[in-house]
Amino acid sequence: MPRSFIPGPRLFLLACCLALLAGCARDIPAFVPPDQRPIAGVDQPWPANHVLALAYHDVEDSDPDQRFLAVRTDQLVAQLEWLRDNGYQAVSVDRILDAGRGGAPLPPKAVLLSFDDGYSSFRSRVFPILKAMNWPAVWAPVGRWIDTPPDQPVAFGTLQVPRDHFATWEDVRRVARSGLVEIAAHTDDLHQGILANPQGNEEPAAITYRYDTAAQVYETDAAYRRRITDDVRRITRKIRQATGRAPRVWVWPYGAANGEALDIVHRQGYQMALTLDDGLGSAHAPLSIPRLLVTDSPGISAFARSVLATEARNDFRVAQVDLDYVYDPDPAQTDRNLGALVQRMADLQIGTVFLQAYADPTGDGLARAVYFPNRQLPMRADLFNRVVWQLRTRAHVKVYAWLPVLSFDLPAGIDRVVRPDPAHPNAAPTPDPTQYRRLSLFDPRARAAITALYEDMARAAPIDGILFHDDALLSDFEDASPAALAAYRQAGLPDSIPALRADPDTLRRWTRFKSRALVDFTLTLAQHVRAIRGPQVQTARNLYAEPILNPASEAWYAQNLDDFLQAYDWTVPMAMPLMEGVPMAQANAWLDRLVAAVQRRPGALDHTLFELQARDWSRPGQPPVDSRILAGWMQRLQRDGVRHFGYYPDDFVQNRPALQAIRPAISTDWYPHR
């Protein structure tokens, strides 16, 4: 009788290795051929009618003084020569405006040179260089500084600067006659800070509603507009007197723009406005031209890296933060919490924070109070402005205001989102207890109140963007409020939920109507915010994963990936496998599927930020996700071709997720660039 076969040690080891490799292979991201991988921004063709704008200040022959953001003369020459040798072409304001009106297109690698503040070095050092190269430029003096009498120092912030460090109106006149230099307005006397909040922060005067400490009130909208209008008229008159023509270009002090001020500037005849935002400018959006700030007198290598980085859309890395973690009834503890938050964001070396602007201490998603002065809800604390400003100036991050779209606890009388109970068809519709408690977007009273809240938020702080929360959804039984049923009827749809669900075609049309209504409402909110804060404000909106993985589920959410990609600057899928009930062992494969579904849309990854979960809401006590697992998910996304991602929540008090674990995975400063 033959004995049983027992593999030898080597065969046994080989079998184990093969089994192990087979198991691992199931978790290896799919191979993407080189010709199918995303093309780096710097390697993509120059976008049509776009311009790289550079912001210079003072120019000195030696020891450039960074109080004036000075660049050394020889470095300026080398930088302009590098631009010329690498195919960049300086263009004039006339050429940009003409291209925007449908005239001759801008050349590839168009460059707009600008020099701020009105230093005398522009006349003595910069102007001869421009004439030698025949390159046009913009020169933007500050009226009050140029007005300083010859025998007095210039009051430059807290400094008393010798008068000859700044130009004269005669210098402005002579330079303007050349036809090579456009004289722009850098305000008359708004290049300074003013008190912006009860905590004592000073913020740019051109974009800030002044806080009156004695009266404990903010400047009214009418007073703000009057102050800005007077300044714009003064500097316009002074430049016209010096040059014989009214200025057409407005240069924001500190690069900070404001929508209400921009409206005033535009009404005064200005056709172009320059900020210090990131990226290339478009000839079709001349009132919001971003610029690359040139400072620290960079050498050619550093200068070239900055220029090339500006051409590419930077990796978007985000931490989403609850302002509830910062607030404390004790102001001293609030300050300590804020200090911890700012230090952590600086240590993370990311680019953006999604910051909660409403109070939600119970965690149910219903905004019963907010953190900014407003006309609709109680203010838990006047904190939003201070935190935004500290994050922007100390942690050097952009800040998006995170607000609900519909979940506000406003007075009774406004329609709420309700649904019929299928088990009790004759009962009156009621709010779904498993969902956010939401106002009906179809009720004009709700729309007006929510719009007012967004306007007040925009006035309160210099935000860079808006994150629309994930409460903007409607199920396949919602909304059955009177206002919603009337809206369906007006749109040519049935005005009862059973009739709307009666056949697949009607259900599909009803679903699309609701999806578009939610998008349109958020775009209206964004329009109101931009009118106050400026056209540079970006939009982002949370999207559930299921409508991406299963498009038919749009009926359950009234959310559609293609709608989001078209409507918002950033689509933000909640890439949260544990929240979706996915076992931990299958989380990586689930993330791969989610990325692949987005990637099937050409260019979609360039406008999509995947938001991971740092807490496991499916388990009792909602414990934090292990930081090493979270870092692994981040690395997984990058191997799948994702450049833009973030996580929620960041618990900066408890160091969760652990900084040392996630920083190499999320920071563009640490990984993969260093």
Image (cartoon, rainbow, N blue to C red):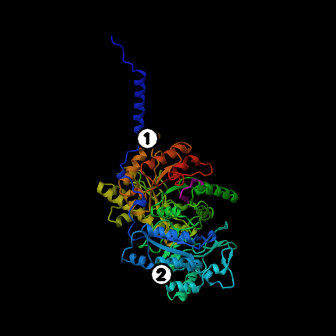
Q: Is residue 292 left or right of residue 211?
A: left
**Which one is nearer the viewer's eye here, 655 or 174?**
174
Residue at 56% x, 75% y is: 116
* C-alpha distance separating marks 2 and 1: 63 Å
Q: Is residue 77 left or right of residue 201?
A: left
Instruction: Identify the residue under disc 2.
Output: 180
The quadrant of the image that shows the N terminus is top left
Label 2 or label 1, whichever lies nearer to me, is: 2
Q: Secondary structure at mark 1?
A: helix
**Which one is nearer the viewer's eye here, 78 or 250?**
78
As drawn, the label of residue 277 is none
Instruction: Identify the residue under disc 1.
Output: 586
Which amino acid lies under the numbered mark 1 shown in the image of this protein? Gln
Which amino acid lies under the numbered mark 2 shown in the image of this protein? Leu
Residue at 47% x, 40% y is: 584
On the image, the x and y values in percent for residue 356 come to: 55, 59
Does residue 131 lie above or below 14 as drawn?
below
Residue 596 visible at all: yes
Residue at 38% x, 77% y is: 101
